[in-house]
Image (tube, grey):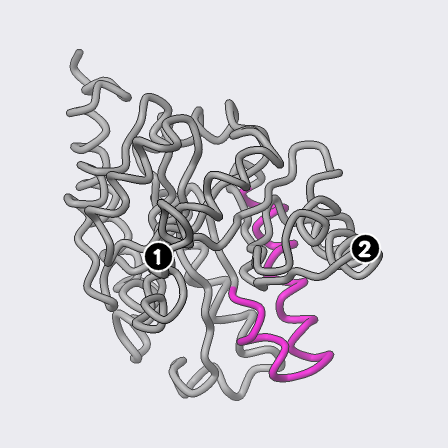
């Protein structure tokens, strides 16, 4: 999926919601555990009830890899289910890969060719030659870690590097590796003021914004600081949606939470004149 197609989906759904499929076997309803593939069954029902409101899904591969080959099969089935039933939806593999040479090239083939995801989160610490192999695929995206929403982001990401903080240097340097047609950046919702500064630095790029909901990020603040003339945001919510209930109504409750966010997002997009009111 290219940038134009992504923005078209945002406009069509009046949403920039990304649903994180961080499916923890210990948190899903007990009734699903008797099924052959409880993780996939949980994901399928979440997808069925939230696809109208989401423009992206982001499975975190750790929650699948923990179960070895069977977990990987759950991930493959989940991605294939989205592809078959909602081909318009952007799929981000949250795997935080990054290495040099053939290692990165094979990571890229695994996620882009075999799993057929649209995007992959990549760690920038090893530099340009660890990121470049992921950029050799048409209409596929690198989602580069820049300013993350966890407490430990303070340990390194705010260190001064010359006249900039480290995360600012990463952002500035990475824009020389790829355009806004191939690369987006992870910028946490728990840093709304920094998000605004980063938007000034990078007016054309998309940001994947985790941290809204369970981690305390504020959607209004994110939109105020981060929206651009092509939206430029994918706001991720994981726990706040998929674990809205641990009972048999889990999928319906997930739909309710996704719809609440979509309604807010629609208003924010309209305020920015990025979509039109239905009666306009």
**Is disc 2 placed on a helix, strand or loop?**
helix
Residue 85 drawn in magenta: yes
Q: Which residue is drawn at 20% across and 23% down?
A: 272
Residue 174 drawn in magenta: no
Q: Are marks 1 and 2 in contact (CB under 8 Å)?
A: no
Q: In which quarter of the image is residue 72?
A: bottom right
Q: In which quarter of the image is residue 220?
A: top left
In the picture provided, is 275 more to the left or to the right than 127? Answer: left
Which is closer to the viewer, label 1 or label 2?
Answer: 2
Q: Give the range drawn in magenta.
A: 60-86
- Above or below — where is 224 with respect to 7? below
Going from N to C along the chain, the mark reached first, 1 or 2, is: 2
> Where's residue 76, x and y in %?
67, 63
> Where's residue 234, x and y in %?
38, 43
> Where's residue 118, x and y in %?
61, 44
- What's the mark number on residue 210? 1
Q: Which residue is drawn at 36% across and 66% down?
A: 153
Q: Residue at label 2? A: 101
Q: Residue at x 23, y 48 (%)?
A: 261
In the picture provided, is 14 more to the left or to the right than 98? Answer: left
Total numbered labels: 2
**Pointer 1: residues within 10 angstroms few (<14), some, or many (20+)?**
many
* 280 vs 24, nearest the viewer: 24
**Pointer 2: residues within 10 angstroms few (<14), some, or many (20+)?**
few
In the picture provided, is 279 more to the left or to the right than 125? Answer: left
**Is disc 1 placed on a helix, strand or loop?**
loop
Cα distance in 3D space between marks 1 and 2 = 29 Å
Q: Quadrant of residue 71?
A: bottom right
Q: Main secondary structure of the magenta part?
A: helix
Q: Which residue is drawn at 52% across and 70% down?
A: 41
- Above or below — where is 8 with respect to 244? above
């Amino acid at each position: 999926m290219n940038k134009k197609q992504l923005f078209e989906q945002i406009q069509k759904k009046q949403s920039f919601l990304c649903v994180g499929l961080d499916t923890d076997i210990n948190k899903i309803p007990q009734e699903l555990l008797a099924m052959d593939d409880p993780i996939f069954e949980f994901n399928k029902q979440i997808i069925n009830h939230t696809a109208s409101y989401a423009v992206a899904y982001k499975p975190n591969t750790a929650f699948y890899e923990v179960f070895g080959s069977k977990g990987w099969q759950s991930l493959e089935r989940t991605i294939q289910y989205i592809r078959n039933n909602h081909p318009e939806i952007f799929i981000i593999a949250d795997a935080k890969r990054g290495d040099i040479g053939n290692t990165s090239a094979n990571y890229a083939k695994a996620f882009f060719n075999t799993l057929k995801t649209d995007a992959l989160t990549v760690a920038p610490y090893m530099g340009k030659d660890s990121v470049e192999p992921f950029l050799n695929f048409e209409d596929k995206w690198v989602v580069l870690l820049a300013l993350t929403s966890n407490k430990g982001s303070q340990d390194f990401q705010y260190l001064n590097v010359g006249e900039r903080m480290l995360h600012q240097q990463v952002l500035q340097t990475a824009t020389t590796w790829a355009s806004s047609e191939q690369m987006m950046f992870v910028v946490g919702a728990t840093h709304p003021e920094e998000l605004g500064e980063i938007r000034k630095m990078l007016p054309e790029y998309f940001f994947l914004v985790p941290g809204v909901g369970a981690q305390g990020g504020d959607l209004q603040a994110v939109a105020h600081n981060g929206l651009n003339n092509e939206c430029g945001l994918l706001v991720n919510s994981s726990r706040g949606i998929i674990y809205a209930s641990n009972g048999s109504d889990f999928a319906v409750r997930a739909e309710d939470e996704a719809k609440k966010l979509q309604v807010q997002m629609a208003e924010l997009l309209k305020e920015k004149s990025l979509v039109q009111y239905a009666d306009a």
